[in-house]
Amino acid sequence: MKKNVGGIDRVLRIVVGLVLMGLAASGQIGHWGWLGAIVLATGVFSFCGAYTLLGLNTCPMKSSEKDS
């Protein structure tokens, strides 16, 4: 899997995933809040399948890729 989630996008995914799971665990929102685990995983692994399908990438280019 090639990384396609980077920077602020990654941080936001981790935070939102944790918040959703916390709210679901405390009963403040329904069971759908456990979908935050998917959001959290995309942030932790820096990979989003939807981004691949849509051709998006928020990772900065590495210096070796810029030279090519």
Image (spheres, rainbow, N blue to C red):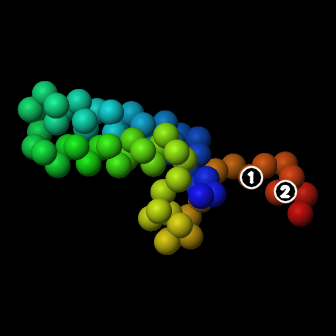
Q: Which residue lies furthest to the right in this view?
A: 67
Residue matched to label 1: 61
Who comes first in sequence, dot 1 or dot 2?
Answer: 1
Residue located at (13% from left, 45% from top)? 31
Amino acid residing under circle 1: Met
Judged left or right of residue 58, residue 12 is: left
Report the Cα–Cα distance between label 1 and label 2: 7 Å
Residue located at (22% from left, 43% from top)? 34
Disc number for residue 66: 2
| Residues at marks 1 and 2 touching, judged by CB atoms closer than 8 Å | yes
Residue 58 appears in the rendering: no
**Residue 19, relative to residue 10: is it above or below?**
above
Please provide percent x and percent y for residue 19.
28, 33
Please provide percent x and percent y for residue 28.
10, 33
Residue 24 appears in the rendering: yes
Query: Does dot 1 land on a helix, a strand or a loop?
Result: loop
Judged left or right of residue 19, residue 27 is: left
Q: Which part of the image, by quadrant, shows the C terminus?
A: bottom right
Please provide percent x and percent y for residue 58.
59, 53
Category of crowding for the residue at label 2, using alpha-carbon neighbours closer than 10 angstroms: few (below 14), some (14–19), many (at least 20)? few
Judged left or right of residue 65, residue 36 is: left
Amino acid residing under circle 2: Lys
Query: Does dot 2 land on a helix, a strand or a loop?
Result: helix
